[in-house]
Structures are given as structure tokens and as C-alpha cells.
Image (tube, grey):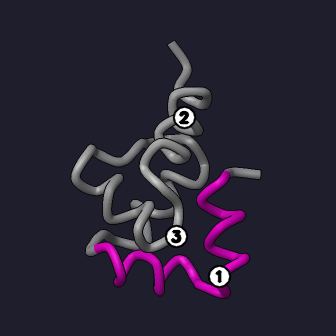
Amino acid sequence: MNVIVQRRVALGLTQSDLAERIGVSVATIAAWEHGRRYPSQPTLQRLYEALDLDAQAIAAIYLSEVKP
């Protein structure tokens, strides 16, 4: 399961809640959760803050998930 889904569910947030917190659409959250898209650097910072993760943890997760 995707780390975004895991953290979002653990925090009791819906996709809509998370999207509102970081200023993106629900479709964008869904795309991230399904690995179809990845957040930009500024959005990544808002994402890790909303999910209560540090920058190094989420960056490492994304680097391991990005397919060359």
C-alpha cells in the first residue's frame, strides 16, 4: 500500500481532507496514491507536513517508488 494512503488513513483523513489541506484536487491525491503522478517539490513539502512526516522520510519513499 502506498505511503500516502497509509498515513492518510492512519490520520483519519479522506482524500478530500488531504487535498484541501495542501491545496490540490482530489484527483491529484488519487493519482499520487496510485503512482500515476508524483508531487512537485513545493507540494511535497506541504504533503509531508500534512501527513506528519519529515522531508527525508517521504523523499526516500518517493525515490524508491519512482520507476526509471
The percent coordinates of residue 19 (x first, y second) are 39, 76
The percent coordinates of residue 64 (x first, y second) are 60, 27
61 in magenta: no
Residue labelled with disc 1: 11
Q: Quadrant of residue 20?
A: bottom left
- Reply above or below: 15 against 56: below
How far apart are labels 2 and 3 at the CA level?
Answer: 15 Å
Q: At 35% across and 48% down in the image, what residue appears?
A: 39
Circles 3, 1 touching at the beta carbon (< 8 Å): yes
- Nearest to viewer (mark 3 / mark 1): 3
First along the sequence among labels 2 and 3? 3
SS class, disc 2: helix
Residue labelled with disc 2: 60
SS class, disc 1: loop
Give residue 52's mark: 3
The percent coordinates of residue 4 (x first, y second) are 59, 59
The percent coordinates of residue 23 (x first, y second) are 26, 74
Q: At 40% across and 68% down in the image, what residue appears?
A: 49
First along the sequence among labels 3 and 1? 1
